[in-house]
């Protein structure tokens, strides 16, 4: 039995996976965001620990036998967040999260003072990344910055509470802008650009390696075995998207997924480091040895549909999607166009100042028209990202579709026709990062089976990281693709024409 813990933005999820790849149990605890100022997004780490403890105790109460059989635990989590600790490992301030946009000026400063940034980190400086956040703290909270002894990512702060050790995995560390992504190690040059040293960073481990052991008191509290060699193993784990990729079997080149969650992501696995910072593509280490990945990221996806549902006063997103499904093609063509930049944008524009736009509204438009505009606009935003990834024609046979938005067949079909690639959903696809974390724990438990160079044998990956059973397949519809083309062409003109009209942060 293996336990996966996924520390998300809105919820912490736990999952128990047995040796036959069956999900035995899941549970979760809700989390809340704080937005003390416009563009700010924070959470206090103590909230994460309270939620994790409550969820663990619930699993211990409802599935005591399964918990007693757990052989290892893995961690997944929201990326880029900055948890600042003093010399006593005490939290100095609320964590600044991935969707915080305050550090725009610091991004420009980092790009100007560190010309080697793109070559080493493989990414543009964006407000969501960790390094610009620390420059912001250095500039605006200098006394606090002087007390920073350690900077941890969210899931790795959780690891510190579980094990007493400060360790990160390479996929999560790659999202800081402090990692030499090709060499899979901290970069002294990039750390120096933000006034930090490697001594203030956690140790690094591959996601499938043992990275700490559970403290005995916690094992007793939650009904877990103490484990051998000093405690139950905790795997390095992964950033949420890399862990989700492991969970849906995207572990080999040209395998990937589309995620329709709070944000929208297209993820492609690579066998080498393939940076493309000019198009704001993320190039990171995967959660597996000798493996990398690319991501296009948009900051608002399924959250935009929730926004329009609340705006129109409907009871649920499902009710809104049902209204959209009833629209004829002609009615869809009459809908307004929507720029889905409610929280700024990353790929391909890297513009924290970008804002959402409904273009072409008339008094005849209904809730259904607005819902369609949002679903279509998110699809067009993902198409921008798909093109930025530059996959060779025909190299990608299909992509998995995960996240809350994947529950809508209507949206899934629209996306397949927009992207021009088949999409498939999976049974249990909602497990996401928690399933990937459990699989990484499984790999860590079998670490003696690693090849001599530390890589994972293909047979081991096939056995432990298969794609879950397919639920539905959505093929591109040629007629719908043709209908969408002129609307996408008009949509693509909006951002360039409006870019200079968005207020600066």
Image: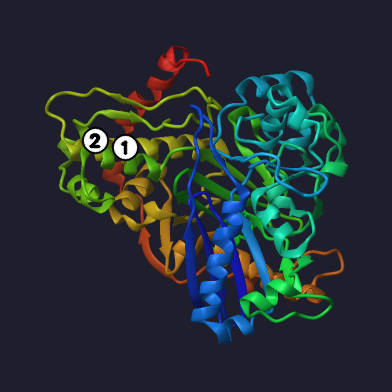
* Residue 426 in sight in this render: yes
Please indicate whether residue 390 sits to the left or right of residue 414 in the image.
right
- At x 31%, y 46%, the residue is 478
The quarter of the rendered structure image containing the N terminus is bottom right
Tell me whether the residue at label 1 lies in contact with that at label 2, contact meaning CB atoms closer than 8 angstroms: yes
Q: Quadrant of residue 447?
A: bottom right
Which label belongs to residue 489?
Answer: none
Q: Residues within 10 Å of mark 2 (few under 14, many from 20)?
A: many
The image shows residue 505, relative to residue 403, as above or below, that is above
- The residue at which mark 2 appears reads as 370
Which label belongs to residue 374?
Answer: 1
Q: How many marks?
A: 2
Q: Horizontal and vertical percent for residue 206?
A: 76, 59
Q: Residues within 10 Å of mark 1 (few under 14, many from 20)?
A: many
The image shows residue 389, relative to residue 439, as above or below, that is above
Q: Residue furthest left?
A: 364
Q: Secondary structure at mark 2?
A: helix
Q: Horizontal and vertical percent for residue 317?
A: 28, 49
Q: Secondary structure at mark 1?
A: helix
- At x 59%, y 49%, the residue is 78
Determine the CA span between mark 1 and mark 2. 6 Å
Please indicate whether residue 320 sits to the left or right of residue 22 in the image.
left
Q: Horizontal and vertical percent for residue 147?
A: 80, 36
Q: Residue furthest bottom?
A: 65
The image shows residue 335, relative to residue 43, as above or below, that is above
- Of residues 448 and 152, the one nearer the viewer is 152
Q: Quadrant of residue 150?
A: top right
Please indicate whether residue 310 sits to the left or right of residue 92 in the image.
left
Q: Horizontal and vertical percent for residue 310?
A: 27, 41
- At x 68%, y 29%, the residue is 132
* Residue 254 in sight in this render: no
- At x 39%, y 33%, the residue is 340
């Amino acid at each position: 039995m293996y336990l996966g813990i996924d520390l998300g933005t809105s919820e912490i999820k736990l999952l128990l996976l047995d040796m036959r790849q069956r999900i035995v149990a899941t549970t979760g605890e809700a989390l809340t965001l704080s937005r003390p100022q416009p563009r700010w997004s924070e959470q206090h780490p103590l909230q994460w620990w309270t939620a994790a403890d409550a969820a663990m105790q619930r699993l211990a109460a409802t599935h005591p036998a399964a918990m007693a059989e757990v052989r290892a635990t893995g961690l997944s989590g929201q990326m880029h967040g900055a948890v600042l600790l003093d010399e006593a490992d005490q939290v100095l301030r609320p964590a600044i999260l991935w969707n915080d946009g305050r550090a725009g000026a610091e991004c420009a400063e980092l790009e100007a003072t560190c010309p080697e940034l793109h070559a080493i980190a493989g990414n543009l400086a964006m407000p969501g990344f960790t390094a610009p956040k620390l420059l912001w703290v250095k500039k605006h909270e200098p006394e606090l910055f002087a007390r920073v002894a350690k900077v941890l990512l969210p899931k790795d702060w959780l690891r510190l509470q579980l094990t007493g050790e400060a360790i990160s995995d390479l996929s999560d560390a790659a999202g800081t802008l402090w990692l030499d992504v090709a060499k899979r190690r901290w970069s002294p040059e990039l750390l120096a650009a933000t006034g930090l040293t490697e001594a203030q960073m956690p140790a690094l481990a591959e996601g499938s390696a043992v990275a700490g052991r559970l403290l005995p008191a916690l094992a007793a509290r939650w009904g877990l075995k103490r484990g051998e060699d000093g405690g139950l193993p905790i795997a390095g784990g992964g950033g949420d998207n890399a862990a989700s990729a492991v969970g849906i079997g995207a572990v080999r080149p040209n395998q990937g997924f589309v995620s329709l969650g709070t944000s929208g992501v297209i993820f492609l696995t690579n066998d080498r480091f393939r940076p493309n910072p000019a198009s704001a593509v993320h190039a990171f280490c995967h959660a597996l040895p000798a493996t990398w990945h690319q991501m296009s990221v948009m900051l608002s996806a399924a959250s935009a549909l929730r926004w329009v549902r609340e705006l129109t006063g409907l009871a649920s997103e499902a009710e809104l999607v049902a209204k959209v499904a009833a629209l004829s093609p002609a009615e869809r063509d009459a809908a307004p166009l929507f720029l889905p930049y409610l929280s700024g944008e990353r790929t391909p524009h890297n513009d924290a100042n970008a804002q959402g736009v409904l273009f072409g509204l008339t008094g005849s438009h209904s809730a259904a028209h607005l819902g369609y505009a949002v679903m279509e606009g998110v699809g067009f935003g993902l198409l921008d990202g798909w093109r930025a990834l530059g996959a060779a024609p025909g190299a990608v046979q299909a992509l998995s579709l995960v996240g809350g938005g994947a529950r809508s067949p209507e949206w899934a079909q629209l996306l397949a026709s927009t992207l021009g690639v088949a999409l498939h959903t999976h049974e249990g696809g909602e497990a996401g990062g928690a399933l990937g974390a459990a699989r990484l724990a499984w790999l860590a438990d079998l670490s003696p089976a690693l090849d001599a160079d530390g890589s994972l044998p293909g047979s081991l990956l096939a056995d432990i990281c298969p794609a879950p059973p397919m639920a539905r397949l959505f093929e591109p519809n040629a007629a719908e693709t043709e209908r969408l083309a002129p609307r996408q062409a008009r949509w693509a003109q909006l951002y360039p024409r409006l870019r200079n009209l968005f207020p600066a942060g």
